Image (spheres, grey):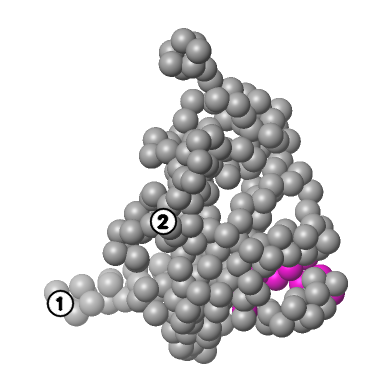
Amino acid sequence: MPLMHFVVVLIVVGVLLWLVNRFWRREGLKVPPRQKPRGRLWFNDGSCVRLRPEHPNHVWSYDFVSAKTHDGRTVRMLNLIDEHSRECLMIRLERRWSSVKVIEALADVMVLKGVPEHLRSDNGPEFVARDLRKWLEGTGAKTAYIEPGSPWENGYCESFNSKLKDEFLNGEIFYSMKEIRVLAERWRVHYNTIRPHSSLGYRPPAPEAWLPKSLGYGEVETATRFPLLHTPDGDYRPTKIDALH
């Protein structure tokens, strides 16, 4: 009896293997080739082994995030962050981007923050354009392109993009470019000056950079409440206090 049981098991296993192989051949499936082992490309804190940020303005990273206005048209947001301080240096929105517009956006930030040593990005057409690379070379900034199909190598920017979607884009309906620009800048200030970051000991990246100096726009942007009530045109809705005046 044990011998018969063993023979039956062998027959059943052989039939199953034959059926599996026949199914694979019929569907055109192939066993993927064995890949060579690769070393780790990041540390436990998410920083890349290839280029780890050591001080402010050492490594900046930038990437695009897509959103839509109420009419279904696409808006592309160019996000620029300092990987060491975690500060969001820019959120610029356009319907369409070109390398010239990317250069203009980077130049505006570099005038205020200085020139970084490295600029990390993926291999998108706007980032690998010849005129952009030539311009960056003239400023002294070095490009650091990640491997194609490896977004985790741009981990800081990918993490920021995820927070931007979860905390801002997914909870809003935008009716105009003016509205999304105003709200995006307001969220950027909130992110830099108020929102706690676990990697920074639950402190904001740049709390001293946006202290209110006078009445008006500055105090509105640094208010602790977010999001503020707004109209589709990006203006603030009148409150009861405003109505009294």
Q: Position of residue 172 (x, y in %)?
A: 53, 33
Q: How many marks?
A: 2
- Main structural element of the magenta stretch: helix, strand or loop? loop
**Residue 217 relative to residue 178: left or right:** left
Is residue 190 found left or right of 26 in the rendered image? Answer: left
Residue underneath mark 1: 2
Q: Position of residue 121 (x, y in %)?
A: 64, 70
- The image shows residue 243, relative to residue 32, as above or below, that is above
Whole-percent x, y for residue 97 in the image = 78, 54
Sequence order check, earlier mark of 2 and 1: 1
SS at circle 1: helix
Which residue of the protein is positioned furthest toward the left in this rendering? 1
Please name the amino acid that badge 2 sits on.
Answer: Pro
Q: In the shown orientation, is residue 130 left or right of residue 26?
A: right
Say which quadrant the N terminus sits in: bottom left
Point out which mark residue 56 bears: none
